[in-house]
Amino acid sequence: MDHRPQAWGRPRDDVYGAYDGSYMQQAHGPNQHTQSPIVTGTSVIAVKFSEGIVIAADNLASYGSLARFTNVKRLLPFAGSSIVGFGGDISDMQYLTRHLNDLEIEESYSTPSTAASAAPRLTAANLHRYLAKLFYARRNKFDPLWNHVLVGGLDEEGSPFLASADLRGTTYSAPSLATGFGSAIAIPILRKVVPDEEAAKKLSKEDAVAAIKECMKVLYYRDARSLDTYSIAVVTKDGIDLKEDEKLEQQSWAFADRIKGYGTQTV
């Protein structure tokens, strides 16, 4: 009798003939899951205001429904003038992060270091177009980057810029944007603050930050894949103000015992 573990459960060769192990040949390779996101990030939310944009994303990366990694930063500054917020697959986010870091280094060396050219070559609008075409090219190869990104900063004229690109290369722009569950939960809140572009031009930085923080609190209560620690960035002509370990203020589950159906209650 063959007691080797690899033989457990196999039919006996002397009864059923030699076992066909051709499917295990190295030519077939191991199982690959590049088309199935495993570790993912949830919502990224952003809004325009009079001088720039505010963007935020929590620091959680979920392994399916397990809150596995609680210190994953999903906001990436670029060239000191733009920022990219990543939703979706974390491994593809890491690939894009390395790719954009290489691009930033290449741009910094190819840009003349004169006072007249102090402004970065790639604005947020340029960066968004680049990422959109990259997503679309990978989609056409049937090997998409499983992400939905928000790109914020300033355009060529120095005006606030905010736009989205997803794994299919679909793009759109609006005064307020969100990915993931935030599209259903945060956008209605932000649209009350900035219903259109004219309202965004009148919105102050303080009100924009307050609206984003309120959305992060609501998402923490309503989205099972969110966390109470998050990153938030403000992008203006003066640069990027990025804070990566913010905690929700005045958040508490004390209200839960007043919700019908929660825990043991006396009716």
Image (cartoon, rainbow, N blue to C red):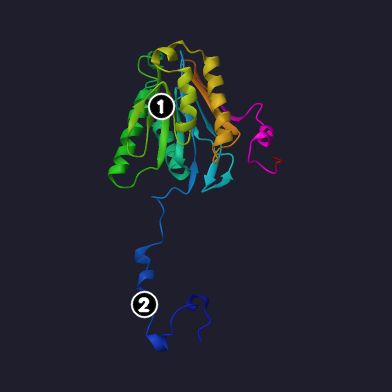
Q: CA distance from mark 1 to mark 2?
A: 57 Å
In-image side of 218 versus 158 (left or right): right
Q: Residue at 48% of width from left, 22% of height from top? A: 190
Q: Nearer the viewer, residue 9 or 244?
A: 9
Residue 183 at x, y = what percent?
45, 32
| 262 up-or-down from 151: above or below | below
Residue 39 visible to an observer of this rendering: yes
Residue 159 at x, y = what percent?
39, 15
* Label 1 vs 2, first from the N-terminus: 2
Residue at the extreme right of the image, as rendered: 266
Local SS, label 2: loop
Viewport quadrant of the C terminus: top right
Q: Which residue is tagged 1?
A: 108
Labels 1, 2: front one: 2
| 140 up-or-down from 218: above or below | below
Disc number for residue 20: 2
Task: Count neighbours of disc 1 (C-alpha within 10 A) and say few if under 14, some if 14 to 19, many if 20 or more.
Answer: some
* Magenta highlight range: 242-264
Dot 1 amino acid type: Ser
| 158 up-or-down from 245: above or below | above
In-image side of 144 versus 5 (left or right): left
Dot 2 amino acid type: Asp
Q: Residue at 38% of width from left, 30% of height from top? A: 164
Local SS, label 1: helix
Residue at the extreme front of the image, as rendered: 267
Where on the picture, by quarter, is residue 99?
Answer: top left
Residue 2 at x, y = what percent?
50, 84
Residue 60 at x, y = what percent?
56, 39
Q: Residue at 57% of width from left, 32% of height from top? A: 230
